[in-house]
Structure formats: structure tokens, C-alpha cells
Image: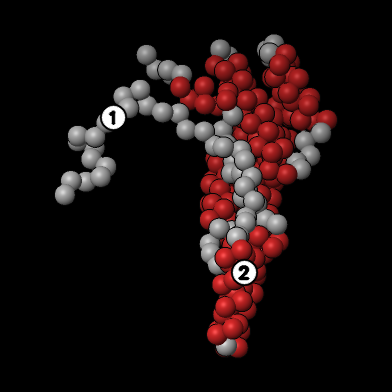
Amino acid sequence: MANELDEMTGPVNEQGRDVNVIEKQIPAKVGKGTYVFVVCLFILGIIPGLIFLAVYQGAKNYLKGLQQKIQHDASQIDNYLEQRVIILQNLVPLLNKAIDLDKEVLTKVTALRSGNNINGDASRNEVSNTVDNVSRSINVALEAYPDIKAHKEIADAMQQNSYLQREITAAREVYNDSVSAWNQAIFQWPAKALAAARAGYTTRIPFTASKETKEAARQVFFN
């Protein structure tokens, strides 16, 4: 019997495919059959019922613990983002004295200065993408001024910015792993799915790359 997915003879998409994250929260639900199953366990005897109650309580505790881990992972991203915003806010005035930065860069930095409060997954993703865009614009502007790049304060700030960017990338991966574990757990039947449905839990949206970031990744950097 041939392989179902045969890379040698199967259809190949030579154009490739761009993958996007679907930003949709799906509620955890269970049908009547789940409740019938639980009732049947108690009908069979007190021991099967008590065993399920123990498993159900364990599922509730697991989901609550995982929810706290997601919050912890998110706060790590927030901490790195806050540090990166401060560095860029200090860097822009230094650069603006030497070169004329794009007005859009100044506008974005001003917006971050006036209020970079992060409330929820969506705003965290938005702030992160804005910071990435500002940093990318500054890098492009500096390419034309190698002497300024050698300035100690500017060089130190850019080095810290690069370090924090790598830390945010790593923290994003940890956060997305926790979100993936959550999104799978709330549909695991019967105990976790029942606990999630009764608590009104939904799937969570992982960190996503912005449209600008994806377009930048497609550009040709070397000829």
C-alpha cells in the first residue's frame, strides 16, 4: 500500500502557501451525551462516580493552573516590550538631532510614549508589532549613516534593542506553546471538556506576525 501523503508522486503546490492565524475564539462545548455519560457512571456505582469526580476536579485544577501559566508567559512579553519601548523612546531623540527621521516613526514613538498600556492579547500583539515596525524603520534610516551607527550611545541602544527583540521572540514561543496546550486541553473529552464548557472557556489566540512583518520577510535583501 502506497503512502497516503507521497511527496514523490502526490500533487505539489509550486506557488507555496501563506499561512495565517485565524483570530477566532471558539467556545468549549459538550453535548447532552456527556452529561448522560456522567449520570451513567453514578448509576453503575458510587466508586465509578467518585473516580470521575476526582478526575473532573483534577481537570479543573489543571485548566486553572494552565490559565495562570499563560498569564505569567504574557507578563514576560509585557516586561520585555516595556523595556524595548523605553529604549526606542530614548533612541529617537538622539537620532533626530543627527538625521531627519520619517514622521511616521516619530508619530508611532509618540503614541507609545503617551500610552502603551497592554490590555489583553490583541493590544499586546498590536504594541509588539508597532515596536517592530519602529525598530525596522530606524534600522533602515541608520543604514545611510554608518558614522552615526558607531556613536556609543546609539550603538549601545541598538544592541539592547536587538537583545530584547530576541528575548521577545523566545517569550512569544513559550507563550504560544502554553496557548496551544490550552486550546487542545479544553476540548479533551470528557473531564477537561466538561470543566471548560461549564466555566465558559474559549480558545485563546496566539501571537501573530503583522502584515508589515510578513511583507518585509518576503523582500530580497541580497542581490
Horizontal and vertical percent position of residue 186: 59, 58
Horizontal and vertical percent position of residue 9: 19, 34
Q: Is residue 221 left or right of residue 75?
A: left
Question: Which dot marks residue 100?
Answer: none
Horizontal and vertical percent position of residue 110: 79, 25
Question: Which dot marks residue 12?
Answer: 1
Evaluate whether residue 2 shows in this view.
Answer: yes
Evaluate whether residue 163 shows in this view.
Answer: no
Q: Is residue 163 left or right of residue 120?
A: left
Q: Residue at x 65, y 25 (%)?
A: 134
Instruction: Give the SS element for disc 1.
Output: loop
Q: Residues within 10 Å of mark 1 (few under 14, many from 20)?
A: few
Image color mode? secondary structure
Q: Which circle's residue, 1 or 2, is located before the other in the chain?
A: 1
Name the residue type under label 1. Answer: Val
Quadrant for the C terminus in the image: top left
Query: Does residue 204 lie above or below 122 as drawn?
Result: below
Query: Does residue 175 lie above or below 101 as drawn?
Result: below
Query: Does residue 203 lie above or below 106 as drawn?
Result: below
> Residue 51, located in which quarter of the rendered image?
bottom right
Q: Which residue is most to the right?
A: 114
Q: Nearer the viewer, residue 223 or 21?
A: 21
Q: Nearer the viewer, residue 54 or 91?
A: 54
Q: Nearer the viewer, residue 126 or 165?
A: 126
Q: Residue at x 47, y 33 (%)?
A: 19
Name the residue type under label 2. Answer: Tyr
Q: Residue at x 62, y 69 (%)?
A: 35
The residue under label 2 is 35
Q: Residue at x 61, y 20 (%)?
A: 137
Horizontal and vertical percent position of residue 71: 68, 54
Q: Residues within 10 Å of mark 2 (few under 14, many from 20)?
A: few
Instruction: Give the SS element for disc 2.
Output: helix
